[in-house]
Amino acid sequence: ATKPPYPLPSVQLFCEKLLNVKYLSCTACDLSFTDGELWENLITTCFPFLFQFNLLFAFMYPVPSHINISEITEKFQTQFWSQRKLYFVCDYCPSNRATLELYSMPYNNAAIEPLINIYKTTSSSIMIYDKVKELFIKFSTTRDLNTQRIYPNVSSLVLLNEDDNGELFMPFPSLPFVSDIGKIIVWENLRKLRYFCNNYDLMVDVLKCAKNIIELEFLFGYFKNILDKINWLFINIKTFNLVDGFLETNTIEKLSISFPQLEHLTVEIDEDYELYTILPLLVNLSNISYVAIRIYSVKLWKEEIEYWLKTNTLFSNFSIDFDGFRLRLWCE
């Protein structure tokens, strides 16, 4: 069968009505949209006045086994693309959760999760992602971070384990990774860190570099095992989110000592009756103005807790939102 000259017939019919378009941005998830030859034909035929073109393609698993990212990028390396100074990056992660991404440079999204397994680019220069504000990095014990991609304006960093189960069973040295991160971002620009790697030393080393962090999220197990000698790393944190573990009454004192400027707090508790002991302690933290609590096991009547919240003078300065499983209090 002869390959159609456009990615999809419906796209062709639509584009034929837009001959005067000068700026075209496309987000797609059909594999047809990874064909540079088809895009070249479409633009030549339907967009004679096109000045700017942006493409963002993402295809989640299962990615067909015949995918060849070298063949994909080759079709975006013709004279047509080079004359227009349009460059493309193709990422491929051939794992159980295989992912394929193809996008044009400059990259225009505010968030990105670069795939560190296999990638090809039609550009020979260092790639600058200056519009990216939030960067997701997955670490691997076998592959280095790609330091040819620079994210100078990132203010939010999310660190994850690479493998599919969220676990990283092999220990890995932290300093080489921290050094590589410093090559692709500006530490002084970071304001938010979400840390989900199973490596305590790496978290400490990252926080030592990211001295302007004011919002932090990490696993409850790390918080429970925080050593007093690193309390100074949290002195500027104003927003703190604890996940994957239940806050206990005996850890709240550590919270007040480790986070003296804390204003916004999000935690999880196991049983709803624990609200009676935990919540009064949390609202008495010196600077607290917002508390969010997720409740996993509900045994009490919702109306009973609502009555206690409304009649307790400790909460008189807070607005309250409670649905039985999630409680939020905030100062007006």
Image (cartoon, helix red, strand yellow):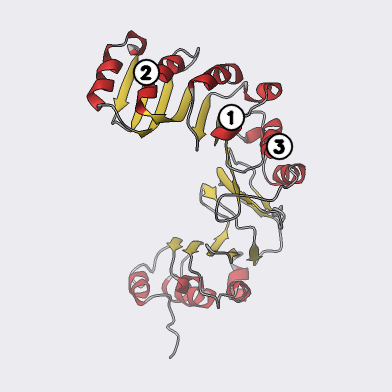
Q: Secondary structure at mark 3?
A: helix
Q: Amino acid at mark 3?
A: Asp
Is residue 37 in view from this perspective? yes
- Report the front residue among 210 and 84: 210
Q: Are marks 2 and 1 in contact (CB under 8 Å)?
A: no
- Checking the image for residue 276, the label placed there is 2
Is residue 200 rendered to the left or right of residue 6?
Answer: right
Q: Residue furthest left?
A: 303
Instruction: Please identify the quadrant where the N terminus is shown.
Output: bottom left
Q: Residue furthest bottom?
A: 1
The residue that label 3 is drawn on is: 201
Percent position of residue 7, x then y: 43, 75
Is residue 22 in view from this perspective? no
Gap in angstroms between the C-alphas marked 2 and 3: 35 Å
Q: Are marks 2 and 3 in contact (CB under 8 Å)?
A: no
- Checking the image for residue 223, the label placed there is 1
Identify the residue at image location x=61%, y=35%.
190
Q: Secondary structure at mark 1?
A: helix
Identify the residue at image location x=45%, y=85%.
3
Q: Amino acid at mark 2?
A: Tyr
Q: Secondary structure at mark 2?
A: helix
Q: Mark 1: few, some, or many residues within 10 Å (few <14, many ≥20)?
A: some
Percent position of residue 59, x then y: 48, 65
Gap in angstroms between the C-alphas marked 1 and 3: 13 Å
